Structure formats: structure tokens, C-alpha cells
Image (spheres, rainbow, N blue to C red):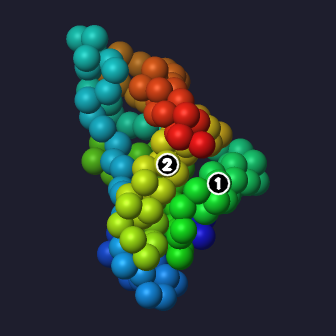
Amino acid sequence: MISIQTEDFDPAEEYSRLKEAAVDAGAIVIFTGLVREDHDHRDAGGSPVRSLHLEHYAGMTEKSLQSIVDEANTRWRLLATRVIHRVGELKPSDQIVLVGSASAHRQDAFESAQFIMDFLKSKAPFWKKQTTEQGSDWVESRDSDAEAIERWQKSV
């Protein structure tokens, strides 16, 4: 199941839903990502992030996320998945994303969750604008994000 939402989420509730949906699961991996105060600006001597505003294109974003989950299901034997991504105005330490994978074995759960997260971060159509004391700017993708995608493409 995929959700794009402004509301926060409860990882414990999402774990319970995955466990219920994934009958006979041997492993469930839940990843939650948080908004960081210390982003690229701070590394370059800038000020901390005050907020992060996320935008998406309804319909297109959900389709993109479903495609990522579908690909994960072709690579690993998954019993259930859960992806939540928040949009709107978020503050440092707010939860921004949840990826959950349930499978019979831990390796499938771990690898699929990482795959989904890597592709979500690099390929899903979200636009992020961060605000600091110095102003606002759009967040660019990082070289490390492209390297993560390349690693998965090599493992096909």
C-alpha cells in the first residue's frame, strides 16, 4: 500500500498492519526517514534547515511509487509492502518517509526496503525546498543517490 499524505504516521501502527497483511512473515523491516537540520548548507558553513517543503504531482507520484514497489516484488519474494511519504511543510526531526517490507526471510526484507528507499529518493517525483536563515532553495539530488541506483542496476 502507498500513501502520500500531510499527516504524520505511527511506525508501530504501520508495523502491525504489515504483520497482519503478511501472513507467515519471518521478517519485517521498517525504515523511517526524518527531516534533518544539518543539510548541505551547514556543511558549507551555512545555517541549519528551518523547514522543508515537499511538493508532488498527484497521480504521477503514486504511479511512480507503485512502479518501484512492483519492481521490488519482481526481485524479492515479498509478502507485503508499505510506503508512506509526507508532503507539505515539515520541520527538522519530523518523519518524512516510511518504507516497510515483509517477507519470509530477512535478506529479502532488508534488501527490498533499501531498494525501495533508494529508488524513491532518486526517481519519485517529489520536489523539496529547504528554508534556512539565508533563504530558500530547491534541494538537488546527490551523487550518492545516483550511485545507489547504479548499484541496483548492476545487480539485475
Q: Residue at x 27, y 34 (%)?
A: 37
Judged left or right of residue 74, residue 82 is left
The secondary element bearing badge 2 is classed as: helix
Q: Residue at x 53, y 40 (%)?
A: 155
Q: Is residue 15 above or below residue 31?
A: below
Visible in this render: residue 51? yes
The disc at residue 71 is 1
Q: Residue at x 35, y 43 (%)?
A: 35
The answer to whether the residues at label 1 and label 2 have Cβ atoms under 8 Å apart is yes
Q: Is residue 134 above or below residue 9?
A: above
Residue flagged by tag 2: what amino acid is it?
A: Phe
Q: Nearer the viewer, residue 50 or 96?
A: 96
Judged left or right of residue 67, residue 133 is left
Q: Nearer the viewer, residue 23 or 40?
A: 23
Q: Is residue 72 above or below residue 155?
A: below
Q: Nearer the viewer, residue 103 or 6?
A: 103
Which quadrant would the N terminus be assigned to in this image? bottom right
* Disc 2 target residue: 115
